[in-house]
Structures are given as C-alpha cells and as structure tokens.
Image: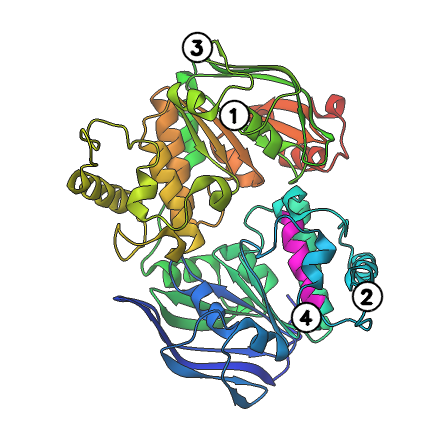
Amino acid sequence: MENTSHDKVIVRMVNITKRFGSVIANDHVNFDLKTGEIHALLGENGAGKTTLMNILYGHYRPDEGEIYVNGHKVVIKSPRDAIKLGIFMVHQHPLLVETLSVAENIAIGIKTTNRILSPVNEIREKILEFSKEYGFKIDPDAKIWQLTASERQYVEILKALMQNARVLILDEPTSILAPSEKEFLFNFMKRMRNEGCSIVFITHKLEEAISTSDRITVLRKGKAVGTFKSLETNVNELAKMMIGYDVFIKDASKENALTDVKVNAIVALEVEDLWVLGDKGEDAVRGVSFKINAGEIFGVIGVAGNGQSELVEAITGLRKVKKGKIKIFGKDVTNAHPSEIIRLGVAHIPEHRLRYGVVENLSVAENLLLKKYNDYMFSGNIFLKMDKIHEWSKNLISKYSIITPSEKTPVSNLSGGNVQKVIVARELSMQPRLIIAAYPTHGLDIVATKYIRSLLLEHKRKGTAVFLVSSDLDEVFEICDRIAVMYEGKFLAVIPKNEADEEKIGLLMGGVLSHEAAV
C-alpha cells in the first residue's frame, strides 16, 4: 500500500515497563508513531499490545519508561490527560453507558457552545453531521444496549472525531466485523491517515496488518521484537516473530472433509418458523426454520445486526420467542429457562463475552466453575472442595493456553483473548451434545483461532452438533458442513459447503443477491 507517513514522530514511548504482580506485561518496550501513518501493533493474546496502549491512553501508569508527544516529555495520568493531548482509544469492548443514548454518551466530557441548556441537542446535530460526512449509520437517539457490536465501535470513533483526536488507537477493531464492514473501516482509516491523523491498529490478524498499515511492530511476551515496513515483510515472517517459532498448523478444511460422513440422523436442534423481537421492538428474526443433526457443524454468516444475536439468544433461553418453536433433541424448549437448556447438554459461547460469558470480579477458577459448582467432584455437604477446584482449573488453564498469573486471578485482569479462552474452556469441558458458538474465535490470535476451530471439529467427530455464528468467511468455509446466510432476519439461503461460493455468499450477506440466484 502507499505509504503517506511523514518523518515527524508524534508519539514516542521509551523503555516502557509494566508489571502486574509477578507478571511483566510490558518489558522495556520502545514504540514510536509518525504523523499521518497507520502503525499496526501485532502480537498473540497476552503479548502486551493493549496494555502498552492503555499506558499511552492513561488507563495505566508505567512502572518504568517515558512518553513523548510532539517531542515533549509528558506524564499521562488519566484518559482525560490523553484526550487533551489529542490521543483517543477505541476499546475492543467500548466503554459506553448502556442505558444512555448515543448522543448522551458522546456528550459526556465534550464541551459545547451552549453552557446553560443540555448539550445533548447540540451533540445530536453534530453526530448527524459527522455521520453523513464519514458514512456512519448511527441513530443519535438509540440506546447503547440496542446497538450491535460494530455500531458501538462506531459510536466511540465518532466521539473521538468530535474531540479532534490526532492519535486514534483502535483495539482489535475488526474482530467481529463482516467483510463489507471491514472494508468500510479500512477506508475510513486510510482517509483519516490522509487527513494527517495517526492511527495505532492493534491486531493479531497478519494479512490485515500488512494490507492496511504503513509499519508493523511485533510484540511477543511483553517485548518488542521488531518493527517493519509493511511492504517489506510477509505473513510467514510476521507469524514467526509473533509466536517465536515457525508456525505449522494443519488445514482444518481438509480435516473437516474427512469427517463429513459422521453426520447422523439424530436431530440435535430444530427451529421452526421462528419470530423474535429485537431490542427496539422490531421483528429481528423473521420466520427462520432449520435443523442441525448430531455430528454436523451448521454455520450462520451475515453482517452484524441482521438477527444473528437475537436468534442465538432465543435458542439459549436469553430472549423470549414471539412465535415458532425450538426443539433440542426432540424436547420443546421454546421460551425455556437457560438452566433447562444447559441440562440438555448445551454449551453456549456467547457473542458478548463480558455481558453473558463471565463474571469479571470472580477469579479464573470461579468462572471456569460457573456451570459445575453443583458437581459432586467440587461440592461437599457444606463447602466447595477448593483443592479439587484449583487442580481442575490449572489443568484447563494449561490445556487451553490461558495466559494468567494464576487460577486465582480475577478475570477482569485478563486480556480479551484470554477471557474468551476461559469461556471456551468452561463450555467445551462440559462434554456438550450441542454447542451454540457465536463468534468463538473473536479476538483470538492465529494459533488460538486454529486451535478453537480444531476443537469444534473434534467435538463434531464425537457426534456433537455445532451451531456456529460467524462473520469470517474463511472460518465458515473451513469448518462448516452447511452455511446459512442471514439478512434482515431471514435465511436467504442454506448451502452445503461443497456447493458454496465465496463471491455469492458475500453478495448474499449484503442483500445484493437473491436466494434464487444463489441456489
């Protein structure tokens, strides 16, 4: 890609060190960002990427090291200090107030010209103005809890634009975006770069780092191991720098081809003419019907906000059904309590990991135990068997490569990718008969992503049914037996993998291609 960066360094971080107890998250890291460049910060889960940028944004104070902005040494004690310096961070999980509207969230902390009346009306007008200019489709009066994950991300970006951010930190912004959404985001990033804004693009996706950025800095185990011009490196070199060794991972699609015969006639999940309301009272799921057999991976792909979330929540008992039926292994569970669904052998890897997946102030061990605390192995007559719990937790931490100081560490102290590993470890260790997985590789690095996909295939071989929701075309083509494309609450097509075409799937996702043209 064209490199439009200048020689002027806007941010320089020197020998940054940050410790959390005995864990060194950043170990004398040097990093610089030039004016008008996109600088990718690449590394596996727990490498220290987000910690480093949280230091620049004032969430953490470094134990050692110095920060320079425009050549001047600065001490950034809080996000307020960073924002005054023109630095803004869009988090992987946006820090927004769920019960407030988009305009009310953006109004927090922004000075307006009217100091007497509520600033919300003025902010509302600015949101509409910026949305039109940059192509964001955001309703300023919508409540945050009503928005999709990508829309929440755009709200934080709008807030940054309205505060005249000159350094924009994007933390894993593409984790759950569909191809069209990624293209929109990348075009926005390039536009901002060309307007002189400097962008730090935190990612673990090698191809995106190369195609989108001007330079790439690789972190491994808290250390910066190299900075490269994007045009002068390649995926294999970056993967080796990121992991520390040559990465060889078998192709899961070939592995899946060998297991197609395992699908059997036992219907694990049956959904019939399902209608589900969304948070705004609209019909989010409209007349969806399908069956999944034991030993089959059934994938649903679509742009976020087309009913996937509501469909998953209805199946798992987290959202009421307006009309239709849901059966799990022949039992009608329409509007059943989640605990009843769990008892049928259903594992759930949720889309919103912090809202539905973990209890942040509990430890890793306690979160791993959430669905097994009544198990005779861990529960005595009065007290839990803590020795057994910690031994069992350590085994799961090792098996699933969860990076944590110990099993006693609060989940809130883990990176997003490692929180996801905790959820996956808990759910898959239950030996489920049906797995409901919404974006299970969201936020995971290349090794962890391949590992999770291989685990889903392993469960498939054992006869487990898998209902997978994804926005990653590569993922559904790699491991799914059938692929459903969801658009505006409906399945436009359900296509066997061997008959699927990436171009047609992409057009269906955008509502461009009709069902008839796809089949």
| Outermost residue to the left | 387
**Badge 1 is on which residue?**
317
Magenta segment, which residues?
150-161
In screen coordinates, is 257 left or right of 504?
A: left
User: Three-letter amino acid code at disc 2?
Assistant: Leu
What amino acid is found at the position of numbered circle 1 in the picture?
Gly
Q: Residues within 10 Å of mark 2 (few under 14, many from 20)?
A: few
Nearer the N terminus, badge 4 or badge 2? 2
Q: CA distance from mark 1 to mark 2?
A: 43 Å
Asked which secondary structure carries label 2, the reply is: loop
- Specify which label sits upstream in the sequence, 3 or 4: 4
Secondary-structure class at tag 4: helix
Mark 2 highlights which residue? 117
Circle 4 residue: 193
Give percent across and percent down for residue 376. Answer: 21, 26
> Does residue 21 appear in this view?
yes
Alpha carbon of mark 4 to alpha carbon of mark 2: how far? 36 Å
Is-magenta flag for residue 79? no
Tell me what residue is drawn at x 42 percent, y 51 percent.
417
Work out how far the residue at label 3 is from the one at label 4, CA to CA, in angstroms. 54 Å
Q: Marks 3/2: CA distance?
A: 63 Å
Q: Earlier in the sequence, mark 3 or mark 2?
A: 2
- Which corner quadrant holds the N terminus? bottom right
